[in-house]
Image: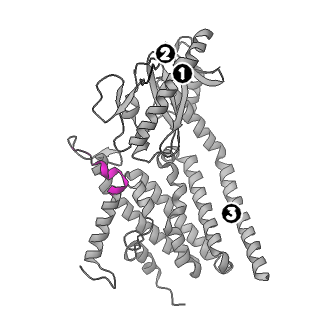
Amino acid sequence: MPTLPPKKEIFLTGLWKDNPVLRQILGICSTLAVTNLMVNTLVMDVGLIFTVCMSSLTVSLLRRYTPMRIRMMVQTLIIASYVIIVDIMIRAYLPDISEALGPYVALIITNCIIMGRCEAFARHNPPVASFIDGLGMSLGYSLVLIAIAFIREPLGFGSLLGFRVMPESFVQWTVMIMAPGAFFTLGIMVWILKYFRPQKGEEKG
Amino acid sequence: MKKRVLSVVYMFLITLFFASLVSTVKLLSERKIEFNQAIKLQRIILQVLNIPTEERMAKEDFSRIFKNRVKEIDVEGRTLYVGYEEDGRTIQGYAFPVGGPGFWGPIQGMVGITPDATKVLGIAFIKHSETPGLGGRITETWFLDQFKDLPLYPIEGNQNIFYLGPAGTGKAANELDAITGATNTSSAVEAFLNQDLDYFLKELWGSIEETK
């Protein structure tokens, strides 16, 4: 097994260099769904950060004991448990936000980033490194979502975090509220990033 | 063989652990969640009956006002809420639950009407699973406020009590703005609200008047 890179390196890889949304194109479903309002985006981010970090940590702690053949089942169980806990907590202590997010909190479980990190990193790396890897990846996801919401909410609703930022005469772009708006925004972001910072094996074109 | 048995035992133990963890969290927050839901229902009933409450009021205050001003009655097996004015005798309005299929899942709401059943006092939605930011906007004030003072009359033929059309095109009092980008949710709301309002006027209103 190759030696582990330093912690800072692991963190930065997830946050930027190997960003889950922009580079790995993971977690797109929730990216398209919640980024039309900044508030929803922020709660989704917090939920995901908690789930990714805790799942990676738990999978890593159990990595020596989990039989290879059933590891996927174990990972799904761990992820599902944390997601349900997040869902219950939000419903108990943040009822208003629970309303706004509706089914999306429970759908955190389908976010490929969580299982991706458990499979690719946590199951053969020590707990602290896995936690940091999860933190980097989920923060990387959060940053991209916030950036997209920062474009979509003002153009789609004329507001940001519920406060009006566009002039009254501004005609709202309805397409920005809908999933295609997120698709265009995300696509353009990936395009710009690939143009200026092509990865190995990709040529400027 | 031994390995397989080990896998089964391992999975069993780990499931037991996580299931217990989730159940504990659930049990600990259950009362809080139920309390939140009860308060939410009370707040929505007060809201559709036009009984003033303050935005930042403590949850206990909602319950107190609700107790003083609202009575639950049973009409033909359906729960109705009667709102009283501050004197506690004059009826301010009736509230009843409405609902039907939305675009993604069932929508539940509450409608308040005037004591003579001629106009809508207010309307609110309790539960829905419409797309946040699109169909989910049925809970926004601008959409709900349109229904205030909507004239009510029993449906005859294939008429509707109200219509939802593209924003800004409505001229008559019963032509309201639909939600742009959420046509399916808007038509669903239009369908079940018309039906439920009509049902109330035709089936329940008679029984209520008799009990007066």
Q: Residue at x 61, y 67 (%)?
A: A76
Q: Earlier in the sequence, mark 2 or mark 1?
A: 2
SS assignment at label 2: loop
Give how far apart the Cα atoms at labels 2 and 3 are.
53 Å
SS assignment at label 3: helix
Q: Earlier in the sequence, mark 1 or mark 3?
A: 3
Is A177 part of what is drawn in magenta?
yes
Have a look at marks 2 and 1 and say if they share a chain.
yes
Residue type highlighted by circle 2: Ala
Quadrant (top left, top right, bottom left, bottom right) of the N terminus of chain A = bottom right
**Where does the image place residue B63, in percent across and percent down from the top left?**
58, 29
Residue type highlighted by circle 3: Phe
Per the rendered image, the range of residues in magenta is A170-181
Q: Earlier in the sequence, mark 2 or mark 3?
A: 3
Q: Residue at x 56, y 33 (%)?
A: B41
| Position of B139 relative to A30 (above/below) | above
The reply to whether callout 1 and callout 3 are in contact (CB within 8 Å) is no
Q: Residue at x 49, y 41 (%)?
A: B102
Is B58 part of what is drawn in magenta?
no
According to the image, label 3 marks what residue?
B18
Residue B53 visible at all = no
According to the image, label 1 marks what residue?
B200
Q: Residues within 10 Å of mark 3 (few under 14, many from 20)?
A: some
According to the image, label 2 marks what residue?
B117
**Where does the image place residue A53, in percent across and percent down from the top left?**
53, 68
